[in-house]
Amino acid sequence: IVAEGTPQKLAGRDTRPAILSFRLPAPMDPSVLPASLATRAAPNGDGRVHVSSTEPLADAAALASWADHNRLPVGDLEVRRPSLEEIYLELTEGDRA
């Protein structure tokens, strides 16, 4: 048993960081993002960049401002909470050996 509780308690979706997900122009690396975002940015393998955020509105604004200032398109921007599946995978990830 890796965790115990109701699905709502285990998920904690309303208290977990949001995920900002977007596409940068190829072949741009996420390290070029503003430092406040770059340290939390991770390529997802499908061409998208994911940024974990406890302040999604402020981070989305910082991303938009940076993109506008640099005249760069940021495609398919999404702001969402992690899904139950993502939380399950996070909980069980440590079990893999």
Image: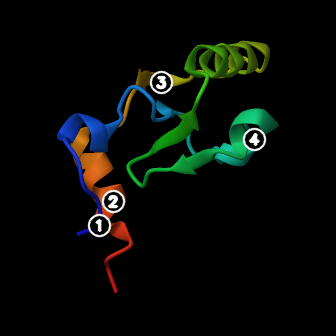
Q: Quadrant of the C terminus?
A: bottom left
Q: Which residue is mark 2?
A: 91
Label 3: which residue? 75
Label 3 is placed on what type of residue? Gly
First in residue order: circle 2 vs circle 3: 3
Q: Bin the neighbour count of mark 1 within 10 Å (Cα to Cα): few under 14, some 14-19, many 20 and up.
A: few
Left or right for 16, reference 68 = left
Q: Residues within 10 Å of mark 3 (few under 14, many from 20)?
A: few
The amino acid pointed to by label 4 is: Val
Tell me the amino acid under the disc marked 2: Leu
* Cα distance in 3D space between marks 1 and 4: 37 Å
What amino acid is labelled 1 in the image? Val
Measure the alpha-carbon separation of dots 1 and 3. 37 Å
Q: Earlier in the sequence, mark 1 or mark 3?
A: 1
Verify CB contact (< 8 Å) between mark 1 and mark 2.
yes
| Left or right: 56, with 46 as reference point | right
Residue underneath mark 1: 2
- How far apart are the alpha carbons under marks 2 and 3? 30 Å
Q: Quadrant of residue 64?
A: top right
Farthest bottom residue in view: 97
Q: Which disc is residue 77 wearing?
A: none
Q: Earlier in the sequence, mark 1 or mark 2?
A: 1
Residue 32: give its label.
4
Q: Quadrant of the N terminus?
A: bottom left
| Residue 70 picture location, percent across and down | 77, 21
- Which residue does the image show at 52% across and 50% down from the upper left? 43
Between the residue at mark 2 and the residue at mark 4, the CA separation in whole angstroms equals 31 Å
- Badge 4 marks a residue whose secondary structure is helix
Who comes first in sequence, dot 1 or dot 4?
Answer: 1
Q: At numbered mark 2, what does the secondary structure look like: helix, strand or loop?
A: helix
Q: Foreground mark, 1 or 2?
A: 1
